[in-house]
Amino acid sequence: MSMQDTDGKQYPLHSTSIPIGMFEDASFKTNTFTYTRGGRLLLYTDGVMDPADSDYLSPILKDHRNIPITKLKDKVIQSLNRQKSVYHKSDDECFILVDLI
């Protein structure tokens, strides 16, 4: 997960908790961050990065920071499909892109 400012600088957002839904009585620590208007936020499940375990989405966000979010979504999906083809993986894949206004 990462947040990107308007200049393309990226800030990783690290999880400090277990995955949601794993345990019924789990408690979660919340955290806040400040952001710059015009930035973008990318959240994704572990299936988006496994098994490659590399952050191949960050360059896509950086290289296409000025395109509309719907076109960026298409680029992320294309990249996910290429990763799936190369690594023959089958896992949950969910991502959320947010324009920060």
Image (cartoon, rainbow, N blue to C red):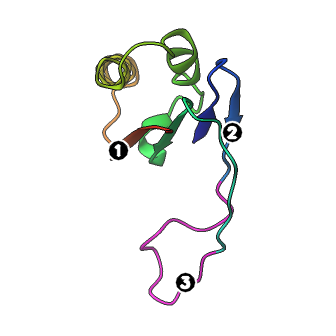
Along the polypeptide, which appears first: circle 3 or circle 1?
Answer: 3
Along the polypeptide, which appears first: circle 3 or circle 2?
Answer: 2
Judged from the image, the secondary structure of the residue bearing numbered disc 1 is loop
Q: Is residue 14 above or below residue 72?
A: below
71 drawn magenta: no
Residue 96 is situated, as x and y percent measured from the top left of the image, at 39, 42
**Foreground of the two, 23 or 63:** 63
Q: Could you tell me the amino acid type at mark 1? A: Cys
Residue hosting label 3: 26
Residue hosting label 2: 12
**Foreground of the two, 83 or 4:** 4
- How much space separates mark 1 and mark 2, taking CA atoms? 18 Å
Which image quadrant for residue 16?
A: bottom right
Judged from the image, the secondary structure of the residue bearing numbered disc 3 is loop
- How much space separates mark 3 and mark 1, taking CA atoms? 22 Å
Q: Could you tell me the amino acid type at mark 2? A: Pro
Residue 25 is situated, as x and y percent measured from the top left of the image, at 50, 90
**Foreground of the two, 16 or 92:** 16
Residue hosting label 1: 94
Residue appearing at x 46%, y 44% in the figure: 44
Q: Is residue 37 above or below residue 59?
A: below
Judged from the image, the secondary structure of the residue bearing numbered disc 2 is strand
Residue appearing at x 30%, y 39% in the figure: 90
Q: Could you tell me the amino acid type at mark 3? A: Ala
Q: Which residues are magenta?
A: 15-28
Residue 24 is situated, as x and y percent measured from the top left of the image, at 44, 87
